[in-house]
């Protein structure tokens, strides 16, 4: 069976930098609390009228295509991970496809929040392995800031989430020893309401009523403690699962790129795995948590900084709303 491989990676961020000090002017929070609990010092938020999920993902995709050395017209398919599409319907894959000027190819949206990019990568990997497609654009992009509750009530989520986009071009590997070795996907819907956005839910008499707006049910709600406790267990579990499936041990990993949920979660995982700093990539300090976009943005930044080299064993891992969690092991 063919193996798939990342041929190029890119990312794009909105220009607007939002510091912790700026947030403390609109809600009851402060720099010390945010840095101590989350590690975040600043994040990027979009500018209305300038950035869209489509425009950010287009820039990320063009960079990934350029680095892969292929034209958009050579793509066979798009898999787009986002929970914050520009339109409620249709999904964002078709909007990106239109912007890239490649009508006709299929475009699929994935709604698995923080694990969305690894789910998307896994779907693309299956299509390439079976020979159905040769070149797939896999995207993770979000604009979270427009949907955050920026009052005191929403502060524990509002300080965490942010905006940005990342993309990879997945193609067929010419070397059977390099590329995606395996992906591992999990979910437990028991915890669906621990991190969720209830409305506009369809099972409502009037899903866009003023009453619902006023109740705050359109905002993302997070039970931070529960998320934290499950995340630290599942991250370790799913990383070990990937290693075991490939008869590898943690010492073989050159770089772990965890979903940027919270710096404390990444540090806990690092400590459990007994990894030195150079083996874990974090950028949440400056970019916040961009949900489905954190992993491709981190991959792109790590690649730019020379922290990913040909032949390196890279482990991607994520946990988030659902709960869902996932990992991917790849030889660069
Ligand atoms: N600024 C200042 N104080 C805040 C605050 C903020 N932004 N948000 C919450 N607080 C307050 C709380 O109201 C609470 O006050 P109280 O003790 O007077 O009741 C206090 O800080 C502690 O709140 P708590 O929620 O227990 O803090 P925590 O240590 O659990 O940290 C999170 C909160 C959200 C940072 C933490 O639970 C977390 O990171 N969880 C994981 C979240 C995550 O990774 N989400 C993404 C998943 S993909």
Image (tube, rainbow, N blue to C red):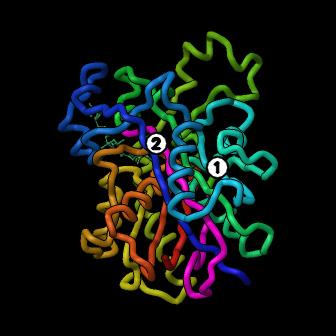
Q: Which residue is mark 1?
A: 80
Horizontal side of residue 240 vs 280, given as left or right: right
Instruction: Answer whether residue 175 is magenta in the image.
Output: yes
Could you say which disc has been placed on residue 163 in the image?
none
Percent x, y of residue 58: 57, 44
Residue sitting nearer the eye, 119 or 80 = 80
Ranked by sequence position, the earlier of labels 2 and 1 is 1
Q: Quadrant of residue 299?
A: bottom left
The dot on residue 164 is: 2
Q: Is label 1's Cβ within 8 Å of ligand 1?
A: no
What residue range appears in magenta? 160-187
**What is the C-alpha distance between the residues marked 2 and 1?**
13 Å
The mark total stands at 2
* Vertical position of residue 115 compared to residue 215: above or below: below
Location of residue 188 (image quadrant)? bottom right
In the image, is residue 93 above or below residue 4?
A: above
């Amino acid at each position: 069976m063919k193996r798939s491989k990342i041929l190029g990676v890119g990312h794009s961020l909105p220009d607007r930098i939002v510091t912790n000090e700026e947030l403390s002017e609109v809600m009851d929070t402060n720099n010390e609390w945010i840095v101590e609990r989350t590690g975040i010092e600043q994040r990027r938020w979009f500018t209305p009228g300038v950035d869209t999920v489509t425009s950010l993902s287009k820039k990320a995709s063009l960079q990934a295509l350029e680095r892969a050395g292929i034209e958009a017209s050579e793509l066979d398919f798009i898999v787009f991970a986002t929970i914050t599409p520009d339109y409620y319907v249709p999904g964002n894959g078709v909007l990106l496809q239109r912007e890239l000027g490649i009508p006709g190819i299929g475009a699929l949206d994935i709604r698995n929040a923080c694990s969305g990019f690894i789910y998307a990568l896994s779907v693309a990997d299956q299509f390439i392995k079976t020979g159905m497609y040769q070149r797939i654009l896999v995207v993770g992009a979000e604009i979270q800031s427009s949907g955050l509750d920026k009052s005191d009530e929403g502060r524990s989520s509002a300080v965490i989430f942010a905006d940005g986009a990342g993309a990879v071009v997945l193609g067929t590997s010419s070397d059977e020893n390099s590329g995606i070795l395996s992906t591992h996907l999990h979910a437990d819907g028991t915890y669906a309401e621990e991190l969720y956005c209830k409305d506009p839910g369809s099972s409502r008499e009037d899903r866009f009523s003023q009453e619902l707006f006023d109740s705050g049910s359109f905002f993302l709600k997070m039970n931070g403690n529960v998320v934290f406790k499950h995340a630290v267990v599942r991250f370790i579990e799913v990383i070990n699962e990937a290693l075991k499936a490939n008869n590898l041990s943690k010492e073989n990993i050159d770089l772990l790129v965890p979903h940027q949920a919270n710096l404390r979660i990444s540090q806990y995982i690092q400590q459990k795995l007994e990894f030195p700093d150079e083996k874990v990539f974090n950028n949440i300090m400056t970019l916040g948590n961009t949900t489905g976009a954190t992993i491709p943005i981190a991959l792109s930044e790590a690649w730019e900084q020379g922290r990913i080299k040909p032949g390196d064993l890279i482990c991607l891992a994520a946990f988030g709303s659902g709960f869902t969690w996932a990992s991917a092991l790849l030889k660069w």
